[in-house]
Amino acid sequence: MRRSKVVGMRDRFHAELDNVSLAQAMHGLSDPLRLRIVALLAERGETECSVIYNDLGISKSNASHHFRVLRECGLIWRSHQGQQQSARLRVDEFDGRFPGLLAAVIRNIGTGEPGPERLREAGEPEGAPTPR
Amino acid sequence: MRRSKVVGMRDRFHAELDNVSLAQAMHGLSDPLRLRIVALLAERGETECSVIYNDLGISKSNASHHFRVLRECGLIWRSHQGQQQSARLRVDEFDGRFPGLLAAVIRNIGTGEPGPERLREAGEPEGAPTPR
DNA sequence: CTAATGGTTCAACAACTCTTGTACCGTTGG
DNA sequence: CCAACGGTACAAGAGTTGTTGAACCATTAG
């Protein structure tokens, strides 16, 4: 509730993973943008927040929103050295709570969007343009 | 769109799994009720729909809604013998699209709710009131 | 045929989510 | 001190989701 007023900005509580339900965890991983954030963190490890929302081309507010969701389901940990802030995946803790889940998601994150690249491999036996 | 008008009720298209995105799949698995349905199907195999919404104590409309979501992300397959209809998990096909994901979810589905049973083990050092 | 049963669809509502813009807070650099 | 910067909080919008109840369709039972 009065999260901000009492402790101020530095509050940014991190979730106690035992209190995170599976549904909540799944919800945290059910947004395309968040999946891209997770993928980015899985690939690069701890990363500055500014880098993340610059690379993803989203607004600061929006990024902050998604960071919050990811924080609240125990997926990321925030830390701040000076004014630069960074995020990292809580891989071990999350895996302790939901064994194998994050690994399975990360493994499948590349095939996330069924867009152009996947449509090619669907039909198209690579011969003619199949004008059927 | 005019799904119902054209083909009628028997339409119930099943998702082409190649067209399902990871985010969509995760969304399908991000609702507590749906997770219970998945858990039930994982445990019992093919099950009649009426049994499902009776055991879960939810309305037919609501069950139908969730069945639809699960169908549209390729998680369940519906079949009908007579007026009885039943559902089953598309374990193999889903695993082909998202290797390891469904297994990981099912494995963790028991610890889904962080409710009462989990709170006990957390705190509650009220030693006295347990006169074992 | 008529009635009952099993599921779906529709309309409607509250609740939530995502997104953006603006104002704000804390730290750092001049 | 004051200004700039990195992030967060708040407000507001459009859009989505979960839930309910009523109407409907299709199949079987009487």
Image (cartoon, coloured by chain):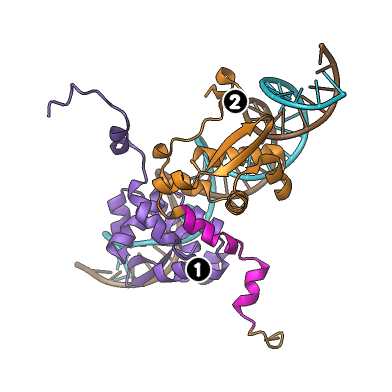
Chain colours: A orange, B purple, C cyan, D brown
Left/right of residue A55 with respect to residue A92 in the rendered view: right
Q: Label 2 marks which chain's residue?
A: A
Which residue is at a point 34% across and 66% down the rendered structure image?
B86
In which chain is the residue bearing label 1? B
Examine the rendering and report whether any part of residue B22 can be seen. yes
Tell me the magenta residue range.
A102-124
Above or below residue A123? Residue C19 is: above
Report whether A82 appears left or right of B16: right
Q: Which residue does the image show at 33% across and 61% down from the upper left?
A: B42
- Taking the image as shown, residue A20 lies to the left or right of residue A116, namely left
Q: Secondary structure at mark 2?
A: helix
The vertical placement of A59 against B72, above or below, is above
The spot of residue D9 in percent (x, y) is 62, 26
Mark 2 or mark 1, whichever is nearer to me? 2
In this view of the protein, which residue sits in the foreground, D28 or A49? A49
Q: Give the label on residue B97, or none.
A: 1
Q: Is B53 left or right of B4, judged from the image as shown?
A: left
Determine crowd level at label 1: few under 14, some 14-19, many 20+ residues with C-alpha closer than 10 A.
some
| Three-letter residue code for mark 2 | Arg
Q: Main secondary structure of the magenta part?
A: helix
Q: Residue at x 61, y 49 (%)?
A: A37
Magenta stretch encompasses residue A112:
yes
Q: Amino acid at mark 1?
A: Arg
**Quadrant location of residue D30?**
bottom left
Q: Quadrant of residue B79?
A: bottom left
Q: Which residue is mark 2?
A: A10
